Image: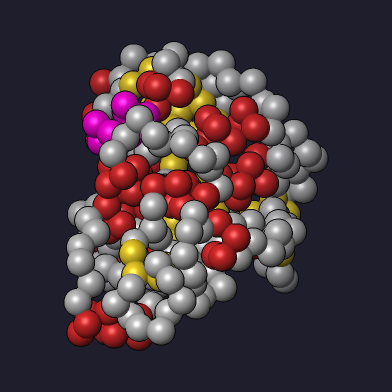
Amino acid sequence: MNVLSLFNGMSTGHTALDNVGIKVGKYYSSEIKPAAIKLTQHHYPNTIQLGDVTKWKEWDIDWKSIDMVLSGSPCQDLSIAGKREGLEGNRSSLFFVFVDILNHIKQFNPKVLFLQENVGSAQKKDVGIMSRALGVYPVRINSKLVTAQLRDRYYWSNIKTAPDGMFGDIVTDIPQPKDRKIMLKDIIESGYVTQNKSFCILEGESRPHKLNRRRFRRWKKKAFVTIVFTKKPLSPFFNRYLTQVELERLQGFPDGWTSILTRNDAASLLGDGWTLPIIEHIFSFIGETNNG
């Protein structure tokens, strides 16, 4: 399978394909973060790096050879954690670059597969716009089913579809994965936690800073941060941030997968990326009869 991965990050798509037994031929990556490129080339040295997604018309690609397009277009303008500028925002509007690329490939290969992911907190109007642009409505899956992290996401794909409702709208027909019942206490390297699940890790995990008393109380109330206590939590002042290995586990990666990077560079990629077991689950349906 030849794959074009836009906003490639740490090549979770490649890892997932490997893990479900689908052989990858050429893997094209559009990515600009140096740490992401470094990690990708470490694990997958044959990856073809393309650079800036907005310059796609300059890429030297045999477009008819592409079997799958992956896209995790920026979510910052869609997320409740952002300014909610939606698809008109500078970053999240890059979704439409993905649509242009996908439509271009469809001229040469109408059966090309695709996967697009974005945040579960996106506004309904933006979800509707994205769905109509792709011709399919998404499935909503929370990573809490397969990891110790709360991570609510929409996934649009034509890997497996079905008609739905009285108008026969095409929906992504990927079932919910089985709950593995993994708790935060199961994945920490040391210490104690008072939560069953980690809050959604974000790119901001790459910028840890000392928690003072006021900030801890405010963040804990707003559920912006996961705290691991170094000893039984009798006081909020004996705490630490998640380690690099813990962050890997929260996204379903093996321990040490990002060990060539600093903790903060790894946190940036993991917090901004895909949950590996979710992508494996979606890819496990490749090759099934499509009902859509």
Question: As rendered, which of 62 and 81 lies closer to the eye?
Answer: 81
| Displayed quadrant of residue 49 | top left
* Residue at 24% in and 59% down: 208
Colour pattern of the rendering: secondary structure
Indicate the quadrant containing the N terminus: top left, top right, bottom left or bottom right. top right
Residue 243 position in % (x across, y down)? 39, 52
Residue 190 position in % (x across, y down)? 48, 59
Q: Is residue 34 above or below residue 204?
A: above
Question: As rendered, which of 118 and 276 lies closer to the eye?
Answer: 276
**Residue 230 appears in the picture as rendered:** yes
Q: Is residue 130 left or right of residue 68?
A: left
**Residue 8 appears in the picture as rendered:** no
Q: Is residue 135 left or right of residue 260?
A: right
* Residue at 51% in and 75% down: 195
| Displayed quadrant of residue 22 | top right
Q: Is residue 159 left or right of residue 58?
A: right
- Asked whether 37 falls inside the magenta stretch, the response is yes
All told, the count of numbered labels is: 0
Q: Main secondary structure of the magenta part?
A: helix
Residue 179 position in % (x across, y down)? 71, 62
Q: Is residue 255 above or below residue 67?
A: below
- Asked whether 24 falls inside the magenta stretch, the response is no
Give the extent of the magenta segment: 32-39
* Residue at 40% in and 27% down: 40
